[in-house]
Amino acid sequence: MTLTDPAIKRHRVSYLLGSSPTPTTNPALPCLLGIRCIVWSLEHSQLHTTRHAGPFIYYAIMGGVMKRFLMLTVIAMSMLGSPDMGRSEVPTPPPPLDIVTLKDGSVVYGEVIELVDGELKLKTSFGVKDVVTIKWESVAKLSINHPIPFHLKEGTVLMGTAQEGTPGTLLLKIESMADALMVPMDSVKAINPLIQPPVVYLGNLNAGLSQASGNSHVRNASVLGDLTGRGESLRLMILGRYVYGDDNGQLTNRNSRGTVKLDFFLTKRFYWFAAAYFEQDTFQDLNLRTSLSSGPGYQFIEKGDYASPYLKDMTLYFEGGLAYFNEDFKVSADQTSVRLRTSLKWNWPILDEQMTFFHYDEFFPSIQNTKDFYLTSDQGVRFKLFGNLVSSFQLTYRYNNMPPPGVRSSDTLLLATLGYAFDTSRKRS
């Protein structure tokens, strides 16, 4: 009998696969094949060596055995990489959709995101950015199939799902309650609102640096900062800038300014401010320019006023009041006056805040001399690079209508900086 004899082949297959040579989907088959390959090769190498085969025949047989063993081992190891081979995956069914029935009979399916300020937002597959906004007063029935917080007008917050009730009511299924709770729809103030922290901080810190050496020795540096903290009724704003430059040790530029302002909101839009302005400029013969002011202001545009994705984050306010204005000069006589102070600040983030246009100015016209006024303004664009890293291009313009002798009226400064921006407000993902 030889290794190629049909009886040996049948014995080989039966031994490797078990009692039956029929293929199986048993996931342990690869291991079984590998183990039985080893045992089979040892048994048959011993069988033929005991029959006193010549050395040449023996090594030829062993070479064939080892070749088959290695091939089966490679196949078995590759099959081990697919432990789920032969198993069918059962797809997970999608969660049930929420149902909004309008008073005109229309029905909208989707996922309820929130109800804020009388507007119900529903995520669908056909809305702009998959979100549809529906007036709450137009809703006749509502069914929400995922747990979500319901804020009632009297202050209670209930966590649960909602089922359609009688016209004008909701049946809230609360986890801690056995029976559904009937709630009038007009008593619901909000559904899943985005709760902001008590104080939200946003701002940025930017810096620019340039240096030349060799035939010239020029250094320029600038640091700019902007911080705003906003609570329910208070807003604190701090602005600062420092610019320095020298050429071969000779000072060419040095000025700094800062504004600190506190706004107290009397209503959602109307507020009263108190502000302090400080500025120093070596080349304007200025030791210190100081302004202390107070007056009313109005927030004309706030975040969320516009539904457009290009305008939704825009803000704009304007304020004006009386100011004490003092200029301490190095050579010229100091000047003190009573002035008006007006200020406008505009911020326009677009493309999910990837780009932001900004403008801020302060204008100080004298009440005692209408020809005497001072203006400072900052405007530019800020780009978000990645994460919180930003790049800014800013133009700063200052104009003094009645400067000291030997000093020009206007100064222009163009700055390109890198920096870090932050915003602690919570955003819907």
Image (spheres, rainbow, N blue to C red):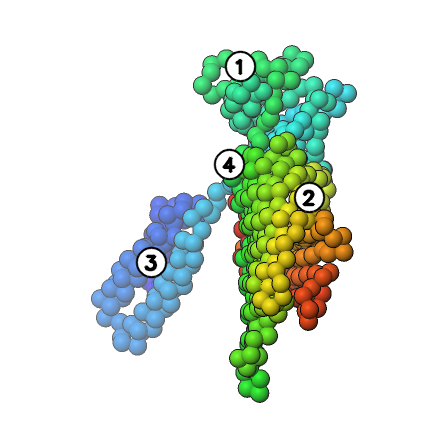
For the point 58% across and 84% down, the residue is 216
Res 314 → quadrant: top right
Q: Pick out the residue farthest to the front.
A: 333
Q: Which mark is residue 323?
A: none
SS under mark 1: loop
For the point 60% across and 26% down, the residue is 190
x, y percentage for residue 293?
62, 45
The residue pinned by badge 4 equals 198
Q: Nearer the viewer, mark 3 or mark 4?
A: 4
Asked if marks 4 and 2 touch (Cβ < 8 Å), the reply is no
Q: Which mark is residue 180?
A: 1
For the point 24% across and 64% down, the residue is 46
SS under mark 3: helix
The amino acid beneath tag 2 is Gly
Q: Is residue 400 visible?
A: yes
For the point 54% across and 28% down, the residue is 148
Of residues 210 and 84, the one nearer the viewer is: 210
